[in-house]
């Protein structure tokens, strides 16, 4: 079975531009969460989507938005990019909204560099 | 506020020896979950082990075991018989509450296994 897939793997953008990152969860998983991992730190929660609805949001500005599609894939959009948005963006897939045990699986991430 | 603390930014261990990575947490919830993830240089977060707050026994998964001391709010990861492939970043994380799959991560520990 395919794991969580994210695209693109690497991306370079200029300050002020907009970017869209994509995530396909594990087949059958209905929940997708997004995390930002700045170099040298642990991941920070951005959003959780379940059944196409936003179920949780971290402490990020409105420049960050996301959506989930009927096939449960998800996109993360970041507008008006800042240098500080440079990070590894991770997508996590889980079967249900409220998980337990081993149900959070991560993709390899998209490494965004803002210049 | 919920918080995860990892006080060891870097650790060395000799191949075939055991190593303990420290994690302390802070929460006022009675129900929570604790996770350990491994992050190799490729970026993917690999799930290692999970401990529920009501689990009476310490979790074990192959060479990984979790030393859960609830009164001390600690959840240390023990890796037995270290292998060169264990060299990576290790993150302790906590699931927040019951209504979402938001994970709160510590700052990580870089483990280097020496031959």
Image (tube, grey):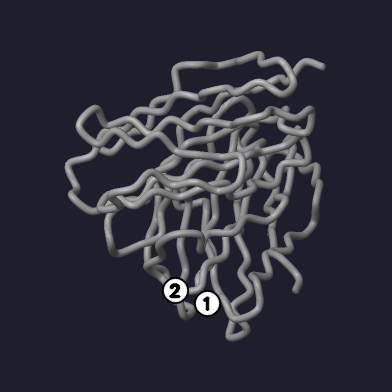
Q: Disc 2 designates what residue?
A: A96
Q: Nearer the viewer, residue A32 or B25?
A: B25
B78 vs B62, left or right, is left
Q: In this picture, is A86 found above or below B112? A: below
Q: Residue at x 34, y 52 (%)?
A: B52
Q: Chain of mark 1?
A: A
Q: Residue A21 falls in which quadrant of the image? A: bottom right
Mark drawn on residue B47: none
Q: Assign the C terminus of chain A to one quadrant of the image.
A: top right
B58 vs A87, left or right, is left
Q: Disc 1 designates what residue?
A: A30
The secondary structure type at the circle numbered 1 is: loop
Q: CA distance from mark 2 to mark 1?
A: 6 Å
Q: In this picture, is B113 found above or below B58? A: above
Q: Position of residue B99 (x, y in %)?
A: 29, 64
A10 vs A97, left or right, is right
Q: Nearer the viewer, residue B86 or A76?
A: B86
Q: Residue at x 63, y 43 (%)?
A: A81
């Amino acid at each position: 079975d395919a794991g969580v897939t994210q695209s693109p793997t690497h991306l370079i953008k200029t300050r002020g531009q907009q970017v869209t990152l994509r995530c396909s969860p594990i087949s059958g998983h209905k929940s997708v969460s997004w995390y930002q991992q700045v170099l040298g730190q642990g991941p920070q929660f951005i959003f959780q989507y379940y059944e196409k609805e936003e179920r949780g949001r971290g402490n990020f500005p409105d420049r960050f938005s996301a959506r989930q599609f009927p096939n449960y894939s998800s996109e993360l959009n970041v507008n008006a990019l800042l240098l500080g948005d440079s990070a590894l963006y991770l997508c996590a897939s889980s079967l249900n909204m409220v998980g337990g045990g081993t149900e959070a699986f991560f993709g390899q991430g998209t490494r965004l560099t803002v210049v | 506020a919920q918080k995860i603390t990892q006080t060891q930014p870097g650790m060395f261990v000799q191949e075939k020896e055991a190593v303990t990575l420290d994690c302390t947490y802070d929460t006022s919830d009675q129900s929570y979950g604790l996770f350990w993830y491994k992050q190799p240089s490729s970026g993917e977060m690999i799930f290692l082990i999970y401990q529920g707050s009501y689990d009476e026994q310490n979790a074990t998964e192959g060479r990984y075991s979790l030393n859960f001391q609830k009164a001390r709010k600690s959840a240390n990861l023990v890796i037995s018989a270290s292998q060169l492939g264990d060299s990576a970043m290790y993150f302790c994380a906590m699931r927040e509450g019951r209504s979402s799959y938001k994970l709160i991560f510590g700052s990580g520990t870089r483990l280097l296994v020496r031959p």
